[in-house]
Amino acid sequence: MVAYILTLSKVQNFSIVILRDPVHRAVSAYSHWMKQGKLSPMLGLKRVAIEHPKLRILEYGFYGRYLEAWMGQIPAERFRIILYEQQIKRNWEQTLRDTYHYLGLDPDFTPERAGKAAHKRWPWSRILFNYYTGKVFNNIDNSALSNAIGRLDFLPFQAITPGDVDFLRSNYLPEKGRIASLTGLDLSSWDYGEKLLQS
């Protein structure tokens, strides 16, 4: 979940919350922390989430508790929820224009890096290589070796296990109805890791 509280003037506060399927968000957060190379990727998502709660891999996916707190303090007309899968992933240009309009900004403004990924996904083989080679690999980040390792993802099965997905689903699925009720949104685009289990 990403939350932005934007103060545009002394009297107007707008809140924009971007919600992503909580299982996929947790997997993304886990991958982010694994890219840092400070924890062994061999621990697995479940162990890292439980043993390192300060990373908030699990915590930030409990949207219901945060939404209830925010919605109790912020008027509905100043609170906007964007679903990542339905709005950003499918049509980020329109979502950006709609958001600018909502904020009273020029809807035709295009940021310099619009549409470009801010953080490139690393395959699991690269995460492992980065962890075991440490700073040496970081120094050759843009080298031919780095690019080759990035293309050869020969260890994807070790990244997220079915047990990890089941762990996340058991935590997040019970909250789905609460989120739908609070937001009034159709959450059918969230598969709660079903595709991860199939792959």
Image (cartoon, rainbow, N blue to C red):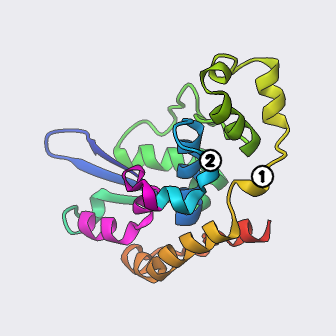
| In the foreground, 73 or 128 | 128
| In the foreground, 190 or 25 | 25
The three-letter code of the residue at mark 1 reads Pro
Quadrant showing the C terminus: bottom right
Expressed as whole percent of the image width and height from the top left, the position of residue 94 reads 58, 49
* Relative horizontal placement of residue 146, taking residue 40 as reference (left or right): right
| In the foreground, 50 or 165 | 50
Q: Residues within 10 Å of mark 1 (few under 14, many from 20)?
A: few
- Give the label on residue 41, or none: 2
**Local SS, label 2:** helix
Expressed as whole percent of the image width and height from the top left, the position of residue 155 reads 80, 49
Quadrant showing the N terminus: bottom left
Q: Tell me where the magenta segment starts and ends, as one range.
A: 50-71
Vertical placement of 147 versus 8: above or below? above
Please give the name of the residue rendered at 55% of the width and 51% of the height, measured from the top-left corner: 30
Q: Is residue 48 magenta?
A: no
SS assignment for the magenta stretch, majority = helix
Please give the name of the residue rendered at 37% of the width and 52% of the height, measured from the top-left corner: 16
* Mark toward the start of the polypeptide (2 vs 1): 2
**In this rendering, the label closer to the viewer, 2 or 1:** 2
Q: Is residue 63 magenta?
A: yes
The three-letter code of the residue at mark 2 reads Pro
Circles 2, 1 touching at the beta carbon (< 8 Å)? no
* Relative horizontal placement of residue 151, taking residue 130 as reference (left or right): right
Please give the name of the residue rendered at 23% of the width and 63% of the height, measured from the top-left corner: 75
Task: Report the residue that reaches farthest toward the left.
Answer: 10
Expressed as whole percent of the image width and height from the top left, the position of residue 149 reads 80, 32
**Local SS, label 1:** helix
Q: What is the quadrant of residue 64 in the picture?
A: bottom left
- Give the label on residue 156, or none: 1
